[in-house]
Amino acid sequence: MSRIRSIHPGIWTDEQFVSLSSFARLLFIGIWNECDDKGLFPWSPLQMKMRVLPADNVDAVALMAELEANGCIRKYEIGGKSYGAVRNFAKFQRPKAPNDIHPATDEILVFAGHSLDKSTKASEPLPNDFPNPSEKSPQMEDGEEEIKEKIETNVSCASGDAPLTVEEVVEGWNTTAASLGLAQIRKLTPVRRKKAQAQVRRFALEEWQSVFAKISQSPFLLGQTGGWRCDFDFILSENNFVKILEGKYDRQSPGSRH
């Protein structure tokens, strides 16, 4: 569940922030919405892309790698699961009822700006804080509410060093579908799972991202040129997936769907 976050005005002139590419800057701010209140999030470029940049044909793996190389976020693993942390998150976000969802080591908590000793002041700021450290006290967050939610425990990393999972693809589809008014997956039946597993083996993360982006930009697939709308079962066909990927439905007439 996305959360309300504050944007400190000093960030727009921070040298480290402005050195990022435009989409990396946008994704970085969007990641704040997807973090728990410690500044931690499941490391899944596909899910993050679908939540923050669903209509943009961008490479989320490359963007997150850029953010990590720039020191904005850090990837780590606990219990075989991959997570990310936002640098100095706790220094500039002040939720009124903080939650505690994702695990982290002491080193990661310090990276995210937490003090390990509650009786002392916060640990020294890391170099290149966000926002600009020349600003006065961090902006307090308004309107944050504690949200009880279930977090999927089977989320795995969708980067090049770990396989894409069916659950990530379904989450990506549901996020995209919700924003576009398309039918979401309510039940992952055995038949759907089998087909999805085959598609996950055939196509890479970047190809799934491209397909979701093309769907969001196709009047035909969105049902704007006729009564039919694209659904998850449609893209589980290898032929249909390839047609979308190759741009067949970018300017497709209603009479030639298959």
Image (cartoon, rainbow, N blue to C red):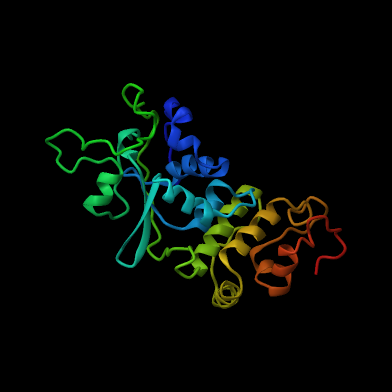
Tell me what residue is drawn at x 32 percent, y 51 percent: 101
Residue 121 figure quarter? top left
Instruction: Report x, y in % for residue 131.
Output: 39, 31
Where residue 227 sits: x, y (%)? 80, 56
- Vertical position of residue 69 compared to residue 199: above or below: above
Residue at (60, 73) in percent of width and height? 199
The residue lying toward the viewer, choosing from 104 and 215, is: 104
| Above or below, comparing residue 155 to residue 136 in the picture | below
As rendered, which of 166 and 158 lies closer to the eye?
A: 158
Q: What residue is at 42 percent from the left and 35 percent from the top?
A: 5
What count of labels does the image hold?
Answer: 0
Observer-nearest of 125 and 216: 125
Please state, as top left, top right, bottom left or bottom right, where the C terminus lies in the image. bottom right
Any part of residue 130 in sight:
yes
Query: Which quadrant holds residue 213?
Result: bottom right
Give the image location of residue 133, x and y in percent.
Answer: 34, 28
Q: Tell me, yes or no, if residue 96 can be seen here.
A: no
- Residue 81 in which image quadrant: bottom left
Q: Left or right? Give the position of 87 relative to 214.
A: left
* Residue that lies at the very extreme toward the left in this rendered image: 119
Q: Position of residue 21 (x, y in %)?
A: 55, 42
Of all residues, the one furthest to the top in this rendering is 136
Q: Is residue 206 left or right of residue 151?
A: right
